Image (spheres, coloured by chain):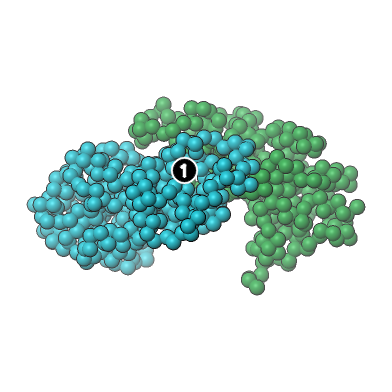
Chain colours: A cyan, B green
Amino acid sequence: MTQESSHVAPRYLTGDKAGLQEFLAKFDVFLFDCDGVLWSGDHLFPGTVETLELLRNNGKQVVFVTNNSTKSRADYRKKLEGLGIPSTVEEIFSSSYSSSIYISRILELPENKRKVYVIGESGIEQELRSENVPFIGGTDPAYRRDVTPADYKKIAAGDESIIDPEVGVVLVGLDFHMNYLKIALAYHYIKRGAVFLATNIDSTLPNSGTLFPGAGSMSAPLIMMLNKEPVALGKPSQAMMDSIEGKFKFDRSRACMVGDRANTDIRFGLEGKLGGTLGVLTGVSSKEDFVSGDVRPHAYLDKLSDLLDSE
Amino acid sequence: MTQESSHVAPRYLTGDKAGLQEFLAKFDVFLFDCDGVLWSGDHLFPGTVETLELLRNNGKQVVFVTNNSTKSRADYRKKLEGLGIPSTVEEIFSSSYSSSIYISRILELPENKRKVYVIGESGIEQELRSENVPFIGGTDPAYRRDVTPADYKKIAAGDESIIDPEVGVVLVGLDFHMNYLKIALAYHYIKRGAVFLATNIDSTLPNSGTLFPGAGSMSAPLIMMLNKEPVALGKPSQAMMDSIEGKFKFDRSRACMVGDRANTDIRFGLEGKLGGTLGVLTGVSSKEDFVSGDVRPHAYLDKLSDLLDSE
């Protein structure tokens, strides 16, 4: 046995009808991580729709909380809809949204340093636009190219044809078009004083039943070069929990976070002092992680749809 | 004052003619880091050629030791020649060369796992060819593209059209064409059991008087995703010192390492138990790093050509 964690071993609820009923009765609000819990990549897990329906039918508030910054809230609603899951934009919290809120409402930037240099996809851009935050980079094709000898000289000289003097924030999210030039520019903006933000720092992203590079992998070169950690806006950052609470005004003791990752989802719920945390084994963390790891949920299931056995 | 380092404060030799003469007399062999010492990017520092000439005229053996894996030894000789510095391929040790030696002569790979998946430029490819090591990746244009939905499925399934079952080593060096697909493939090869090697782990690369992403920044996403460090073959790894000594059979107590980075060059010399280490202030480390840092050279100069004042 290794060193004991701060709370008792999690309860295994798969197949335990009475235990499931007792657990569900404790909560009015369920916060759901999406990828690895409701689906994996483009594959919807069987029973997801029915499980969400069961919760709604029992008067539970459902909130979808995702660290995937490539999509906006509107993109996510479309994705849910496409999978047959009814939802509204207001039920959805993405790390692209919480990052935009943080920049527009919490960071106090000087008037001439309000532009954001984005490493990421269109989800971030849409949410920045929704908060009227000016930005460069992102999906702009001008940044999807090889570095040239002229770039080194211009970047070193702070030439305004490549270094925008109004950039005061670097926001790093998952970018399927990451490249050397983008990392070099982000590094130089931060060295020149820009605030270093990350939508989230998940090192991996589940897809097709395995793992691929996540948003944290985009920040990793910068963290190594700068010897500095970004302010992260996704789970487990409590900035995201605060913004969810600000919107829903729920009682934290009557809320439960459901997720597949001990170190992000479960930590997010525990540090947010929610009444409950529920792990599922359809994503990143293993049974061993949940039972013997440093961060343990209150309960865990083989899969989310095991909740259907409470009926 | 912070905690004392293991040896005394370094001697500042700029302008100290007697001190310079005394220092030079102690050594028969000078190992030179190149970028940040002899030149920066494509800019040769004034006095570099004359300083090397002075050492050669005084019977000193000169060795060029570089962590830049983008060039082969032959490329480096051409670079030196282009700058007016006479040299031979045998005087040059690059991290691409030490990596190839390590793979071909030290790693004991099973017969069906001898292929190397390369993240890096042509210097690595040339040195792997010189040791008859089979490889894929590198500068192959097939890897310089965006990731596709089909890639996720094929990689997850271990489809042999994209995952070569003979790959037993992943070698990561500086790659100006790094992208999401390359990182994803490297991750999956290592998860399938491939040995994780890095030509070097310098986080930054000096160019045009400032810093850009170095080879360590290419390994950083993998280190974060795998929670595992690569075996690094460049400075300060002693695998490189051993291969230099194997070639030159020099007396370590009569050798001096010259470099601009405390944590790589100077550490390399100190851990290799060389008689001397000499820092220069024309690259990454500052005077404060040399004087008060954890890793201190025996002596330091404003610039390499200050050695000319020994005459």
Res A70 quadrant in image: top left
Q: Chain of mark 1?
A: A
Name the foreground residue: B233 vs B307. B307
Residue B299 placement (x, y as % from top left): 77, 59
Residue A139 placement (x, y as % from top left): 43, 39
Residue B219 seen by the camera: no
Query: Residue at the spot x=16%, y=48% of the render?
Result: A51
Spot the residue most to the bottom. Answer: B1
User: How many numbered markers are drawn?
Assistant: 1
Residue A262 placement (x, y as % from top left): 33, 56
Spot the residue most to the front. Answer: A111
SS class of the residue under badge 1?
strand
From this view, report whether residue A241 is shown above or below residue A115.
Answer: below
Location of the N terminus of chain A by quadrant is: bottom left
Crowd class of label 1 (few under 14; some 14 to 19; many from 20; radius 10 Å): many
Name the foreground residue: B51 vs B257. B51
Query: Residue at the spot x=56%, y=54% of the render?
Result: A191
From this view, report whether residue B12 is shown above or below residue B189.
Answer: below
Query: Residue at the spot x=72%, y=52% of the render?
Result: B282
For the residue marked with disc 1, what is the amino acid?
Answer: Gly
Give left or right: position of B213 versus B277: left
Residue B18 seen by the camera: yes
Q: Read off the residue under disc 1.
A: A137
Query: Residue at the spot x=38%, y=45% of the render?
Result: A125
